[in-house]
Image: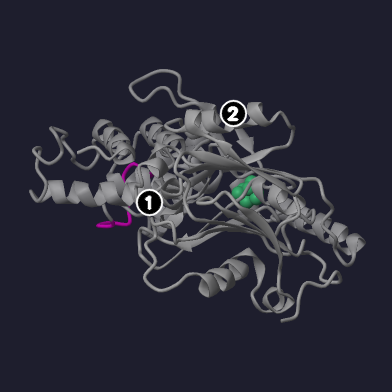
């Protein structure tokens, strides 16, 4: 098999493998054929898991593997080069599971010297991984178990005493093996889909912390710099990215409403009478504290909101603010037009480590069942789970994370 060659720019050429059952770690060279045939972090994850996962693997068993991967365009210094992939067999679907997330983690993993981290086996007690410029430690995380994601990140950053550390962590939902638990980074970015947070929980892996400053070699650094400038310039003039910058992804709500495709009341309608209230435009006028950006990105589509008073306070800025998927799944899909309530649910999902989309869709389905008498107050433990009941929806988010009821 043809192995890694130094002339393959854009890759670090290495896999870090960590076995949590026996605590062994190893470094392997990536195969050049795989790098050429299976593009990007996603392609590599597909290739490796297809090769390594046997038939009938239990997604929440020690035999499942969790891959964190990056591709040749990550960490090369252009806007949009920050997304990393997480993949494994999904506990939600029982088949291929994949999620991706922006932020600082891709930089940290790649500049630490790895294109891929494979986590296999399962620890007996909670641990986290600390990957620092190629070195890896499996550290005790018992005191982190049960903590929300922001607190988890903060404690780990204090503990490792390094600057520029990126953390991907689970919250109580992943620990409790909720099948759509997310892996959360910076407390408001998430590899949310397909329940890979539960796979981390099943391995008793609370978090992965990365930091690196190795050089990512590219074939023509000058061309890459030019490309970065061109992308940034176009980004600042393109009307779509300008809308994203001004109002975030939730700025698309009015357009979707006018096209009749805003998911409403468990998809029974595409038009929501409260659309303006949950839009990014209204967010900008009311509770927006600031915009936030991933490294090197001029778009700054991320929102940071704060709610200090009222029935849905607190909404803390550490947990960011909702994007389109969040205001749709936790707002219009539930018939909820109170933006503060939507933001509170969004914050709780980020804190508990829940996928906002699957959470909202599940609650919407339950609300329709309630409306049709299939679920009653006996099932909901007294909650009036009607469309539009924001207080009930907030409580259900908590119940999902802690698997109550
Ligand atoms: S700020 Fe928004 S557009 Fe820019 S990289 Fe992050 S998620 Fe993507």
Assign the C terminus to one quadrant of the image: top left
Q: Position of residue 323 (x, y in %)?
A: 49, 45
Q: Which residue is drawn at 62% across and 36% down?
A: 291
- On the question of residue 382 being in view, the answer is yes
Viewer-closest of 199 and 264: 199
Q: Position of residue 66 (x, y in %)?
A: 52, 57
Q: Residue at x 75, y 47 (%)?
A: 296
- When the figure is inspected, residue 380 is found, relative to residue 254, above or below; the finding is above
Is residue 290 toward the left or the right of residue 283 in the image?
A: right
Q: Which residue is drawn at 31% across and 37% down?
A: 402
- When the figure is inspected, residue 17 is found, relative to residue 335, above or below; the finding is below
Magenta residues span 267-276
Q: Earlier in the sequence, mark 1 or mark 2?
A: 2
Where is mark 1, residue-wise? 180
Q: Which colour scheme is used?
A: one colour
Is residue 237 toward the left or the right of residue 129 in the image?
A: right
Q: What element carries label 1?
A: loop
Where is mark 2, residue-wise? 154
């Amino acid at each position: 098999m043809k192995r890694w060659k130094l002339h393959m720019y854009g890759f670090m050429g290495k896999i870090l493998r960590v076995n949590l059952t026996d605590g062994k770690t190893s470094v392997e060279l990536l195969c050049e054929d795989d790098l050429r045939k299976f593009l990007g972090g996603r392609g590599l994850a597909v290739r490796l898991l297809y090769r390594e996962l046997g038939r009938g693997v239990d997604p929440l068993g020690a035999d499942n593997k969790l891959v964190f991967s990056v591709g040749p365009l990550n960490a090369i210094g252009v806007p949009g080069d920050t997304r990393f992939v997480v993949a494994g067999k999904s506990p939600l679907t029982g088949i291929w599971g994949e999620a991706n997330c922006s932020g600082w983690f891709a930089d940290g993993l790649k500049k630490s010297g790895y294109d891929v981290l494979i986590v296999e086996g399962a620890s007996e007690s909670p641990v986290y991984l600390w990957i620092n410029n190629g070195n890896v430690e499996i550290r005790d995380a018992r005191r982190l178990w049960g903590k929300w994601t922001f607190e988890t990140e903060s404690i780990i950053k204090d503990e490792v005493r390094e600057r520029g550390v990126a953390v991907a962590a689970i919250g109580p939902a992943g620990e409790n093996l909720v099948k759509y638990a997310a892996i959360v980074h910076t407390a408001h970015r998430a590899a949310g889909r397909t329940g890979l947070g539960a796979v981390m929980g099943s391995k008793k892996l609370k978090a992965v912390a990365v930091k690196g400053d190795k050089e990512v070699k590219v074939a023509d650094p000058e061309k890459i710099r030019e490309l970065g400038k061109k992308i940034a310039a176009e980004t600042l003039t393109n009307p779509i990215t300008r809308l994203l910058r001004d109002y975030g992804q939730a700025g698309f709500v009015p357009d979707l409403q006018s096209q009749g495709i805003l998911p409403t009341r468990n998809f029974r309608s595409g038009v929501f009478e409260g659309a303006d209230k949950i839009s990014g435009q209204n967010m900008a006028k009311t509770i927006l504290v600031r915009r936030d950006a991933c490294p090197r990105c001029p778009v700054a589509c991320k929102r940071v909101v704060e709610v200090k008073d009222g029935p849905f306070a607190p909404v803390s800025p550490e947990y960011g603010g909702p994007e389109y998927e969040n205001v749709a799944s936790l707002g219009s899909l539930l018939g909820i037009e109170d933006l503060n309530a939507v933001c509170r649910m969004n914050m709780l999902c980020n804190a508990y480590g829940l996928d906002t989309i699957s959470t909202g869709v599940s609650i919407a389905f339950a609300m329709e069942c309630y409306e049709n008498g299939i679920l009653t107050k006996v099932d909901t433990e007294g909650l009036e789970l009607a469309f539009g009941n924001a207080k009930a929806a907030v409580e259900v988010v908590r119940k999902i994370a802690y698997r109550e009821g």
